[in-house]
Image (tube, grey):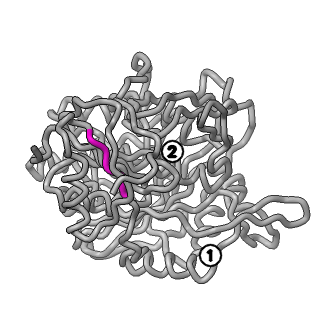
Amino acid sequence: MTMPSHPRVPPPTRAVAPPRRGGTKKAIVIFLVVANVGVFGALGAVWWAANRVSSAVSTIPDLSLVGNLDVSQPRTFLLVGSDSREGLDDLTNFGPAGGQRADVIILAKVVPDDGRMQLLSIPRDLRVDYGGRTGRINATFGRGAVDLVAAVSGETGLAINHYLQIEFSGFAAMIDAIGGIRLTFPYPARDLSSGLEVGAGTQLLDGDTALAYARSRKYQELREGGWVSVEANDIGRTRRQQDVLLAILTQVDRPTSIGGFQSLVDALGQFVTVDSGFDAEEIIQLAWSMRGITGGDVESLTLPVEDFTENGTSYVVRVEPAASTVIDAFGAGTVMTTDARARIQVQNGNGVPGSASTVATVLVGAGFEVVDTLDSVRSDYQVTEIVVGANHLALAQAIADALGYGEVIVGRTPADVEVVVIVGADAPVG
């Protein structure tokens, strides 16, 4: 089963700076409330937490959003990451650009009855016709949230129920507040423009590094002694944004106390804006109905697009019929892709001879495609790691379910595999 080896995933290292002073961030925090505040185990605690969030954030009225009457109905949120430089003390890797554009555009559907969440990323350079002109979809944000909501809804044909906006300055602070996020890199990586610089392997990223990764459009990897551009475009950046978002959703520690949760929420008002209709009552309803959600309940995909140039301007445009198929599935709340196959590399990370081959045999028997087995550079992994990109998160969870052990970690994988399984001491092999 051994084939020409791919780059090994070295042992985890830490890349976390001292905690930043100041607030936390993120529209994602509200989703953390919706998804995880049930950990407190009592409806009264959910009520308290929801009111804390609702009172902390700023609101925008009159966005012409579509309301829901029944809590069991799916909700579609428009998550927007603003590239406003306001609140950033260090603009070295950002530039002094004025105004704001939508650097991150994600449609998120919450399906309470099934306890699921779907994320559909819209590339910011998507070509749209709006307001009598042609341009990139992120540019509509410069005229305000109302125009962006209308542009996204018009382009996709989807009704939007709620709006959540975050700022760059809060992004890094949020990551630091939750202790960093882990991402895995098959090669050392950098972006001289965004300030990204990380080593190979599983890295614990601080807020600044995670922000530099999410913003990277000139992404490079060190391969065979030279720096090579990899997905150094808007499509690649969209995928990296998904990686960070999924890492936050799947790795953040649940608050162990009311006090811990309160400290996380206190500074939300500095960085988060929501529509006025997303009130405490709805947060309570969704939090209670979605309290059992896990990483395996989240499906993430990027709208299928390709590069396009018109009159000297670079865009991305939809690839049909794939784009319409994905949008229709998202709108219906069904699985956005039926491709359940992925190429898997299995690494021996526990030092037990034959561990990788044994696990590979189990996966093949369960219907998965294993293309390679090899030794990891380290043999003391205590927990099996299933490393995967954001687009294959549900599949990685299926692999974990098939094995009955292991932890799913969002990260980059070698170019010719979608999933890397590093076998740890928790694997029942010998």
Judge whether 419 appears above or below 178 on screen.
Answer: below
Please report the residue visible at 37 percent of the width from the left and 25 percent of the height from the top.
Answer: 13
What amino acid is labelled 1 in the image? Gly
Q: Quadrant of residue 315?
A: bottom right
Mark 2 falls on what kind of element? Answer: strand
What x and y, as percent, mark residue 54? 34, 47
| Residue underneath mark 1 | 154
Task: Decide if residue 136 is on the left or right side of residue 80.
Answer: right
Q: Which residues are magenta?
A: 344-348
- Quarter of the picture containing the C terminus is top left
* Predominant SS of the magenta segment: strand
- Nearest the viewer among 419 and 373 is 373
Q: With 339 as the anchor, is 238 left or right in this view?
A: right
Q: Earlier in the sequence, mark 2 or mark 1?
A: 1
Amino acid under disc 2: Ile
Q: Circle 2 sits on which residue?
A: 166
| Residue 9 drawn at (x, y percent) | 40, 37
User: Can you tell which quarter of the image residue 77 is in?
Assistant: bottom left
- What is the x, y in percent for residue 147? 66, 63
Q: Is residue 40 left or right of residue 302?
A: left
Is residue 257 visible in the rendered image? The answer is yes
Gap between marks 2 and 1 measured at Cα: 22 Å
Q: Nearer the viewer, residue 239 or 257?
A: 239
- Label at residue 2: none
